[in-house]
Each structure stands twice: as structure tokens, then as C-alpha cells.
Image (tube, rainbow, N blue to C red):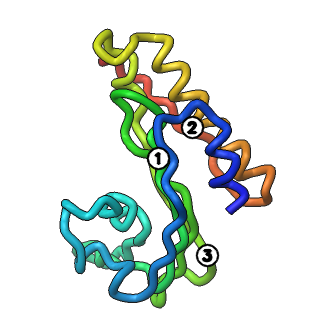
Amino acid sequence: MQLQSRATKLPLTEVTNFIELRDEAADFRSSTPDNPNWWLLIQAGQYLVGETHKQPQPPSHLIAFTTVPGDGCEPANFGLCRCSTGSSGWRWSSFCKTQYTNHREYGGVANFLKCHIAVIKMLDYARELGIHTHPPIISKRRT
């Protein structure tokens, strides 16, 4: 809850309330794209890699919230989840593309910097709270 509280102090377009879901309610396969949490549910799971395919493993328990950094930006989801199979313990894996925020119709470079820095500050806040995070990946492709 501390991370969500700190998110409200950043210049983010939207910060949702926490959701806590268990079992089937946390499984994106039991949901539809019109569910406002659908993308969050997809990111909450993990995949077990087999010899020929990846098997989705939805969480058995998740606690998470969504942020929208700004115009033209994908949502950035933050949370923790636990899956009944696969890795043990609480985990989360997510990504958010900020690259399109620099398009003129969304505000250009100023909007890109606002959005990208806000996402990085969220990762910094998470580290301050003791949550292990990986540094953001910056794409070298130009759009």
C-alpha cells in the first residue's frame, strides 16, 4: 500500500486502487478484454517453459494496482502475486512502453520525459521499500 500511496504523489494520469484477487478471479483466462484489470491479470501470471511450449500459470493470489503515466503511454502495473505451481514466493513481472509518448499528438519530448521518469521513480520507490527490482530496459530502436 505504501507504493500505491507514493504513486499518487507523482504526476501520473491515473492511479487505481489496490485489487486483491484469489484463485479463478486472478486468472486472466476467466476474464475478458473488457475487464479493466485484464492486462494486469495477464502480467500477473508466469509461464512454465516446457520442451515444446509455454504453459500459463495464473496466480493463486495477487495484490496489485495500475498506473497510467500519461497520454500515449501503456499502463504500468505494480503488485505482487503468488502462483500455486512454478516458482515459490511472491513475484511480479511487468513492462510499460513509454516510447510513443514522445509523438507530437501526445505532447512530444516533454511528455515522454514526464512519463518515463515517473515509471523510473516508481521502481526507485519499490527499491526503497525493499522490493527487488531490475533496472528498466531502454530500447535502442527508433520509432
Classify mark 2: helix, strand or loop.
helix
Label 2 sits on residue:
119
Quarter of the image with the N terminus is bottom right
Label 1 sits on residue:
76
Disc nearest the viewer among 3 and 1: 1
Density class for disc 1 (Cα within 10 Å; few <14, some 14-19, many ≥20) is many
Look at the numbered discs 1 and 2 and tell me whether their residues touch, using CB distance below 8 Å.
Answer: yes
The amino acid beneath tag 1 is Ala
Q: Which mark is residue 142?
A: none
Q: What residue is drawn where x is 35% and y is 82%? A: 25
Horizontally, residue 69 falls left or right of residue 9, namely left
The earlier-in-sequence mark between 3 and 1 is 1
The earlier-in-sequence mark between 1 and 2 is 1
Label 3 sits on residue:
90
Q: What residue is drawn where x is 47% and y is 20%? A: 112
The amino acid beneath tag 2 is Val
Query: Residue 56 or 80: which is nearer the viewer?
Result: 80
Classify mark 1: helix, strand or loop.
strand
